[in-house]
């Protein structure tokens, strides 16, 4: 039984970690921090956890965190960068759910997040925690940067096309939509039910922070010399709580062969990527509360534009579930431990 | 490992049984029937089950069902009555999720369901499967009639008041609201999203089929000689999928004492009834996907009307979860087996 | 064409006033105030108004407001009390949508709103703006206190029973539910879509601020000597934007006669109260965006508990529509002017 | 006052026509047909219309329809084709909201709708009723084919780019999403709230019936010799009732100039197309219940992919509102008559 700490547990990725870890057979949450809610029982803030946790939020204490085998950061950007050097020096392994260590170029990070990177010296050793791309590196990593929600759905959808150099990489389009839980648990007018229900809109069309992360991941999948990645990424806000749907468009270079077979083979051994039969349309509810990514591909009118549809639960495979998948890999457990429940439907 | 059959598995209680049983350590679904979907894999109809079940729907076969240790009926009214004599004669135990054996008086059943009872000879041996009231009888039962969703939320809310004869039983009010999944998975105009979203209404105010079931259960809780049960029950339809909220009103007979303590004591040992702290308001989402019932009580302005709020997930504690809870009791397992996951929040 | 001012126009009652007044043939909004949004065009904050208004928000200026024929207050509690003496002294008539002048007893106001009443000297001349009860007084009033949303739905539902002394007034129950727009347009965690969608709960069961307002109104309807009003009022929060549904319960004193006819007669000449045929269940969507209140009554199992169901749009008949109805009466216009559009369905 | 008939009034476009025409100063609905609901008052089927219409549904009668100045068809595909010759011979003008006369090539129609066109001889004289493209033709038309919902949003978004030959026409992408009311008011499992709420999915990615209609419209906008139209169109289903959002992608040919100015000029005199300021993201709720189309354009990272976002209410500008706009043009009325109300927000 490994000891788990969670830094910044009052948001949706925090409560999702707690939900998924409640019955994990090999991991036990021993500390969870929040300055704002210090002393408040987690089950008071999140009534679904009544009867599952006796823990209360505490102020972050380096000594306490240092005794954990693994610490999850479920914090706003910048917090992990500040605390990481001390924590790493104590030998504690970390899965960071924030964007702090996802971008390999500190200047790009600074440009998109609006401040200098606070811990550039640890960027190099951070492993990008997309198991379907980096499983071997994750196993030995001490610091895993857990991918963002849009990046997870988008990369898993594009990877087979790019790895096989089947499409023009400089003209990719990702039209994605997310439930409101992706905006986090913080007071705002824009995310009131009264403002977002019964409505749909794009946002950040001119540039969302996940763009450089996605492009970096797509670049990694592309064979050397195959060209430049150019992605147009437009996120949208759905009037619902959980789920991401990415509709991906790419232009085929030539005869693409059997794309359905290509995807099925690429993900044949992946426990959390499910390629649907030809002609399918994945629904976000088919993955709600689960760590699964479901994917379908098609080629409308047999023209040269291929369409890939990819769905995940943004809080599970898009955040806390993937974080636990990374933990399982890091500690040599069965990768699916604690992540085996079917999605909630209806 | 007991062998489980499900009769009528294409509805929401069917898929909920499959979801909850997917990882049950002591039970395995070996057959699931549907005449309409014969031959169709369950994972095709319910994509959340992809990777969890290889089963396909089959036509009901008495010999196959007779080999099961337990059969769940998740069927429209009347089906279980027709199949029960044969099945019981084979020694198979049954948990019936339909209303077929809930009402003890065959004439009352006939009056509310519009046709004669099809199997009156088995009514007497059917045990009403509300564990918080009938746990000992359930353990030995061969035929358990699993309570309806509204009846579960309402009875659990009223029982402590009635058992202690604290309120006038002839003037009870249950104002309840349910998500649309309570209406089942069948084609209709009335339950389209376009008809039910962004709206709220009462229905069946002049008499809902759950009324006689609830009154029968409340009568059982009332001490002899304490008066007649008279319930006004008005159900409402919520613009959401899962959840029941019952707001119950009763008039206190006199000094009621500490109601909070009364409820906490009554349910202290119940794994699936959670009495919230004084001043709380239970949310349906705090029990979504879980088998928990959460209850709060208050006495506004210290007047003689007591208000009880009770929430369940209509598909879990209100149907399939409670059915599995009954199964666990019938087979001597830990009552919470397979039912331990925290609710999904947000 | 009368000149209209709106104080505090950045909330939902503000935008609803603007929507309804956009095409009113006799009234034109000439000023709208907001300190926080001073200088911002109203059509920037509320994109549905693009092309309909050139106005920008301005800081409140007594001279400008004093030139208006009518000023609507769409402000938080306390603001109208502070500005009213000056404004009234200028001869401007006022419809106050806040709770500042609804309660006739300043001490009761202070008790429920947590501070002393700021303008007790004007309470007496304020007319409670429920046209179905006070039409004649409204016509001549200079200061109209527009009823709250729950109070409107609840009073219209109970009035015929109370006026005719048909029920025990000390045991009334109002189980009501509102869309989230009733909570206003302000940053909060509790009203995020992620917190309120797919869920339902009661709130303020121990005492909501609308309770004394409703009881005062019910008292006014009851014949002298008919007893004391005692109301248990439990509001609930619906996962949708607009609409209030009140389910009202009362115990009949004896033979009540034909309740359906009673309601139809009471409201026969009311343009904004629609008594549905016997057996109906009003849906909130049947009044969405309209000033209509629809009501149905029934008597389940012919017992002595009568059930009244009453629906309004909380922002229209429950606030801004009723405010305009009051304006129409005050200025001698056809009461339905600008309020004639059918509800939006679906 | 012109006399209006509606054929097939029990669906959502029917009730939307009735809502919008209730207060139209120049048009009065004198007959509305439905075989299934013959004799039922429209206000019984659609309670929002209580007090606005005394009409009942009647079986279609050629003589009665022939006395109308204008007949709207709000029918399933094929009905208008069958009734049109008789009706046209009586001199009645028609606005057909179905797809029966939208496609100019009868064989293409047959291919996508799965049966031979039932009235090919009238196709040529049918005018495609997109006022922003065909206003002059509409004015004199006897038969107007009112555009589909997706085609309206998509064409209005692409037209300025195509008319000016700024993009590669053979690589257009329309990623669109619609509320469930687009699926109509008919019993189905797929469109139950329990199946569609809290979820999002694409559908008909391999080919939706609106594809040939959109491509035909885009072709008409493109200068001769500018190339072939090739559109990838992927519709999605939103968990909400009303609204369409089209996110359009095109590859610029070269220096595109000031796209914002281009759009503003193109639509400067259009009463129902609103080009938002640069940097905006139109929300579907900003047009809910209104006939407006709101559009924003951007060019992310100044690359050569231009993104256009276009929103309409599928039942208003996407169907019944546009039908009335066409009617206003055909009869020489102010084009905005009866269509002037601001959208409903929140």
Image (spheres, coloured by chain):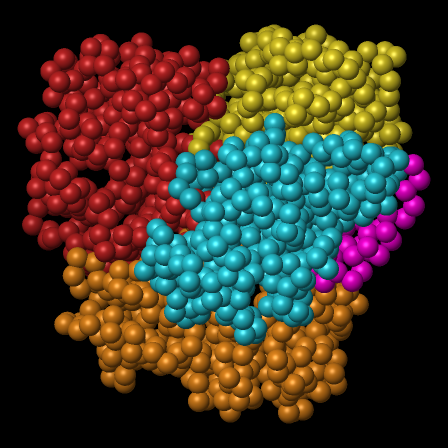
Chain colours: A orange, B cyan, C yellow, D red
Question: In this image, A300 relative to C87: left or right?
Answer: left
- Residue B214 visible? The answer is yes
Question: In this image, C327 relative to A229: left or right?
Answer: right
Would you say residue B108 sits in the magenta stretch?
no
Vertical order, C58 against A45 (above or below) = above
x then y, percent, for residue D318: 32, 36
x then y, percent, for residue B48: 44, 63
Vertical order, D322 against D63 (above or below) = below
> Quick one: quadrant of the N terminus of chain A?
bottom right
Q: A207 or B230: nearer the eye?
A: B230
Please name the residue shown 62% across and 25% down the image. C310
Please name the residue shown 49% across and 81% down the image. A335
x then y, percent, for residue A295: 35, 66
Would you say residue B277 sits in the magenta stretch?
yes
Q: D285 or A69: nearer the eye?
A: A69
- Residue A210 visible? The answer is no
Magenta-drawn segment? B254-281
Q: D94 or A189: nearer the eye?
A: D94
Vertical order, B61 against B301 (above or below) = below
x then y, percent, for residue C267: 62, 12
Quadrant of res C249: top right
Q: Main secondary structure of the magenta part?
A: loop
Please name the residue shown 23% across and 14% down the image. D61
Please name the residue shown 16% across and 61% down the image. A302
Quadrant of res C313: top right
Q: C229 or A309: nearer the eye?
A: C229
Q: How many marks?
A: 0
């Amino acid at each position: 039984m490994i000891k788990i700490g969670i830094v910044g547990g009052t948001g949706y990725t925090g409560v999702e970690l707690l939900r998924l870890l409640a019955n994990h057979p090999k991991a036990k949450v021993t500390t969870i921090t929040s300055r704002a809610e210090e002393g408040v029982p987690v089950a008071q803030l999140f009534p679904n956890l009544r009867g599952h946790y006796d823990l209360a939020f505490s102020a972050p204490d380096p000594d306490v965190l240092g005794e954990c085998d693994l610490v999850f950061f479920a914090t706003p950007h910048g917090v992990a960068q500040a605390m990481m050097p001390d924590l790493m020096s104590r030998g504690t392994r970390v899965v960071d759910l924030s964007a702090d260590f996802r971008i390999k170029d500190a200047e790009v990070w600074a440009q998109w997040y609006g401040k200098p990177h606070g811990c550039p010296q640890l960027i190099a050793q951070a492993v990008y925690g997309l198991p379907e791309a980096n499983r071997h590196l994750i196993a030995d990593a001490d610091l895993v940067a857990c991918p963002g929600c849009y990046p997870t759905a988008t990369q898993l959808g594009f990877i087979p096309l790019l790895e096989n150099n089947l499409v023009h990489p400089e003209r990719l389009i990702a039209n994605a939509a997310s439930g409101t839980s992706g905006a986090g648990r913080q007071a705002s007018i824009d995310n009131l039910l009264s403002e977002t229900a019964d409505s749909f809109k794009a946002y950040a069309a001119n540039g969302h922070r996940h763009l450089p992360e996605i492009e970096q991941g797509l670049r990694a999948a592309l064979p050397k010399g195959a060209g430049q990645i150019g992605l147009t990424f437009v996120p949208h806000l759905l009037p619902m709580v959980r789920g991401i749907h990415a509709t991906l468009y790419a232009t085929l270079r030539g005869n693409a062969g059997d794309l359905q077979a290509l995807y099925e083979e690429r993900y044949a051994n992946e426990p959390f990527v499910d390629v649907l039969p030809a002609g399918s349309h994945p629904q976000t509810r088919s993955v709600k509360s689960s760590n699964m990514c479901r994917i379908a591909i098609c080629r409308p009118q047999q023209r040269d534009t291929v369409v890939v549809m990819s769905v995940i639960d943004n809080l599970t495979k898009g955040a806390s579930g993937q974080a636990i998948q990374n933990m399982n890999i890091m500690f040599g457990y069965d990768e699916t431990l604690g992540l085996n429940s079917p999605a909630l439907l209806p």
